Image (cartoon, rainbow, N blue to C red):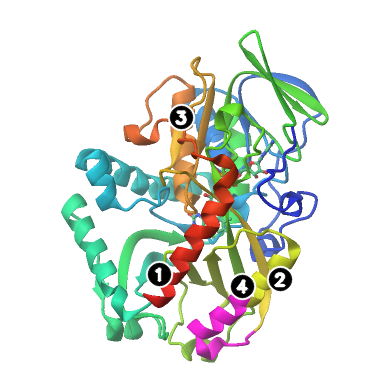
Amino acid sequence: MTIESDLYHPGHYDRSRPVPSYWEATGGPPPAGVGSLTGDITTSIAIIGGGYTGLSAAYHLAREHGIAAAVLEAGPIGWGASGRNGGFCGLGGSKMGYRLMAQRFGTAETRCFFEAQKAGVALVRSLAAEEGIDIEPAGEGEHYLAHKPSRWHVLENYAGTVQRLFGERWALWRKPELEERLLRSPEAHGCLFIPHYLGLHPLRYVRGLAAAAVRRGASVFERTPVTAWQRTDGRHRLVTPHGTVTAERVLVATNGYTPEGLDPALHGRLLPALSSIVVTRPLSPDEQAAQGWVRPALVADTRNLLFYIRLLRDGRLLFGARGGTDASPAAFARRRAWMERRLGEKFPAWRGVGIDYAWWGLVCLARDLLPHLGWLDDGRSTLAALAYHGSGVSFATMFGRAAAARLAGREPDPPLPDFVLAPPPRFPVPGLRLTALRAAYAAYGFKDEWL
Ligand SMILES: Cc1cc2nc3c(=O)[nH]c(=O)nc-3n(C[C@H](O)[C@H](O)[C@H](O)COP(=O)(O)OP(=O)(O)OC[C@H]3O[C@@H](n4cnc5c(N)ncnc54)[C@H](O)[C@@H]3O)c2cc1C
């Protein structure tokens, strides 16, 4: 089995070099107590993937169920999306709107999902506090901007749905209020303030989670890719370059980096998608004032191909965007140039300020636009927790805890709606996933910019 998915350029999966991110440059030391596997071990639960999902599962298995699991991560801890994301910790997991969710699954199930989303954010906060993880919090709440005057109704509809379904009132700011309270931009025409968000340092968080899992009794191995998976006599044998792990049960926590050949039960059920980030040099207080944005804050916009933007604690601007289906180095150079140009269009006073860091990574989509925590076999010995649709900081942490409960034979607390407790559905023609994604991007791009 190769650990590179054949969907994207093989260079994207090269774990021998660090991700050239701002987080990597400021992420502090690697977690204590983590090494590579050498030799053969036996454990009750093995976890493939050392990001938020896998590490949160290992942490909670030890802390809440007294089970010492073994985590196997192919790269350094947090090498996947968990160490390189935008650090928006908020209402995550799904790409399906609440209104459609309520039509399809009913109000009670939708409320259950919303409560689980909020519990995810609370869990990250409490883990950081209890385990002494310096997540460098910066910015409370998300400012959801109408990127055109015509998108004001999107904000109003969203606020109305949330009030009707969950009884929550979120503040709407018209353009003048937005300009007074946060920022000015030719692509900002009002905002919905979503309270359940905080900004954090994603790599510090995932490294802290790994160290906490080890302190609680888990074994965490990095640079330990699973290259073969054998099942004999009801047990699992995971083969890595310098050792094996024999386990009764396995958690698949590989999200957008799931190798196509990892488990046949997952084949054709996931669609990894690129998300890219650039970070500027620090902007001086005068430069910040030129766009009226002078404090750390989280911003996203109403585009289908979402822009996500943060002013960081040291005055740098982090600018992120979804899109693209070619992960080759040449495509990356084009993407970076496009993002620099778009940043200048969105914030004219910051045009040409200079980019210090640029990187990208894979998020994970499912055909039904929902996250999934499901058994992959009838014997309930393999569980998968994945498909967070580009918002997994809190949700993967919460799913890791819920996975721990399921692996320990208990019900997740808080409860999860039934519609996430199953494997993701298969794409009708898996071989055409990227073609379909390209077509969807073209349609979304047209809608976002021209309608
Ligand atoms: C650029 C970018 C920006 C994002 N921004 C945000 C944001 O602001 N807010 C938010 O909520 N979410 C964001 N996300 C999404 C979020 O980062 C993910 O949903 C979350 O990190 C998923 O965590 P995970 O542990 O499930 O998967 P990952 O962190 O991706 O970890 C999976 C791991 O599995 C490992 N693996 C794969 N195959 C094997 C194998 N065979 N053997 C051993 N290990 C293996 C990989 O090396 C990888 O490290 C972003 C993602 C990206 C890429």
Closer mark to the observer between disc 4 and disc 3:
3
Residue 8, how many percent across, how many down? 68, 51
Mark 3, secondary structure of its residue = strand
Q: Which mark is residue 333?
A: 2
Which residue is rendered at x = 62% and y = 86% of the image? 353
Residue 396, how many percent across, how many down? 49, 44
Closer mark to the observer between disc 3 and disc 2:
2
CB within 8 Å, label 4 to label 1: no
Image: 389 above or below 381: below
Q: Name the residue beneath numbered marker 3.
A: 374
Is residue 309 left or right of 228 when viewed as pictured?
Answer: left
Q: How far apart are marks 3 and 1 (CA)?
A: 34 Å
Q: Name the residue beneath numbered marker 4.
A: 279
Which residue is rendered at x = 61% and y = 79% of the image? 340
Magenta stretch, residue numbers: 338-353
Mark 2, secondary structure of its residue = helix
Amino acid found under the numbered disc labelled 2: Ala
CB within 8 Å, label 3 to label 1: no
**Which label's residue is closer to the chain start, 4 or 1?**
4
Q: Which of 400 and 441 is in front in this view?
A: 441
Residue 440, how many percent across, how many down? 48, 58
Q: Distance between the residues labelled 4 and 2?
A: 15 Å
Which residue is rendered at x = 73% and y = 20% of the image? 41
Q: Nearer the viewer, residue 402 or 226?
A: 226
